[in-house]
Amino acid sequence: MPQFTGIELTNGVYPSLSVFWRHIVFRLKTTLASVLVLAVAGCAQTKTPFASSMSHQAVPAAQSQQELVLAEQADALNKMSTDLVRKTTLNGAAIGALAGCGLAVVGGSKNQCIQAALVGGAVGAVTGHAKGKARVAKRVEIVELSRVLPSLRTTTNQLGVVASGVDTLIAEQDAEIFALKQQVEAGQLSQETYETRLSDIRLVRSELAQALSLSVSQAKQANLALQNAQDQGQTGVEWYISATEKLEQDSVSARAKLSLL
């Protein structure tokens, strides 16, 4: 059997161990160099050159984060003010009718009594005479103020959030419009892109103005319902009347800030 003084491999025979290791190191260096070349080539394909990126004009976002947040807050305000109207009108009317029936002369079904009280529009009408009407009006809580109070507070607080957000939004949008105009004048932005963004801003302001207009209307309805309860003899509603008047005025003020450009 032949003897070999070197190291035998499948591809040949190396005369010594040092030659073998030099061969291995050479192979590793070659492989590593190939990997680095491929990695650099991959980066060159995916990364946009700085000069090329500077040549593209900046495209404004369709809707900013502040605009999205404020739209949600305005929607929440409308839901709260709708609830306020419900608690100062429908619920109050039902309470008044039930109380009036409780004081009425016995006769007929309860449903008939409630229907008569609601249609008549006056709690004391079921007594049939002026003296009884005055007595019933004093004893009946036409509007359940314990339910109105938390609704009025949450609506007022939410309006404050929206009003503050309107101030921030107007400042943000005005600054953006100014910057976009400068980009158009410098030839960095097309007139079409500028007009598109300006149209988006107009739409955002219009929708917010509509939401605040609804808040104005609902605050006015709640105020009228409370005044009606006071006219019918309910006491302790003065503060609520004043608070709903302020809610209406603050809604008008917030809406007035939204110039439609």
Image: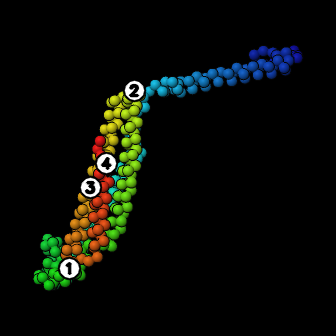
For marks 1 and 3, give the CA distance: 32 Å
- Secondary element under disc 1, as helix, strand or loop, is helix
Name above or below for residue 143 compared with residue 62: below
Instruction: Give how far across and how far down residue 250 sits, in percent.
Output: 31, 59
- Looking at the rendered image, the disc whose residue lies closer to the viewer, 2 or 1, is 2
Give the quarter of the figure containing the C terminus. Answer: top left
Label 3: how many residues lie within 10 Å, few (<14), some (14-19) or many (20+)? some
Determine whether, in the image, residue 105 is placed left or right of residue 71: left
**Outermost residue, left side:** 129
Q: Which mark is residue 258?
A: 4
Image-based side of 157 in relation to 217, left or right: right
- Image quadrant of residue 10? top right
- Where on the picture, by quarter, is residue 189? top left
Q: Give the residue type that dot 1 points to.
A: Ala
Count neighbours of disc 2 (C-alpha within 10 A) and say few if under 14, some if 14 to 19, many if 20 or more. Answer: few
Say which residue label 2 marks. 187
Mark 3 vs mark 4: give the one in front: 4
Residue type beneath disc 4: Leu
Considering only order in the chain, which callout, 3 or 1, is on the residue closer to the N terminus?
1
Q: Quadrant of residue 145?
A: bottom left
Q: Which mark is residue 104?
A: none
Kindly identify the residue that appears in the image at 22 percent across and 73 percent down: 229
- Residue 214 bears which disc, if any? 3
Disc 3 versus disc 4: distance between alpha carbons?
Answer: 14 Å
Q: Is residue 143 visible?
A: yes
- Residue receiving disc 1: 137
**Cα distance in 3D space between marks 2 and 1:** 73 Å
Q: Position of residue 141 (x, y in %)?
A: 25, 77
Q: Position of residue 19 (x, y in %)?
A: 82, 18
Give the CA separation, mark 4 to mark 2. Answer: 30 Å
Can the viewer see residue 98?
A: no
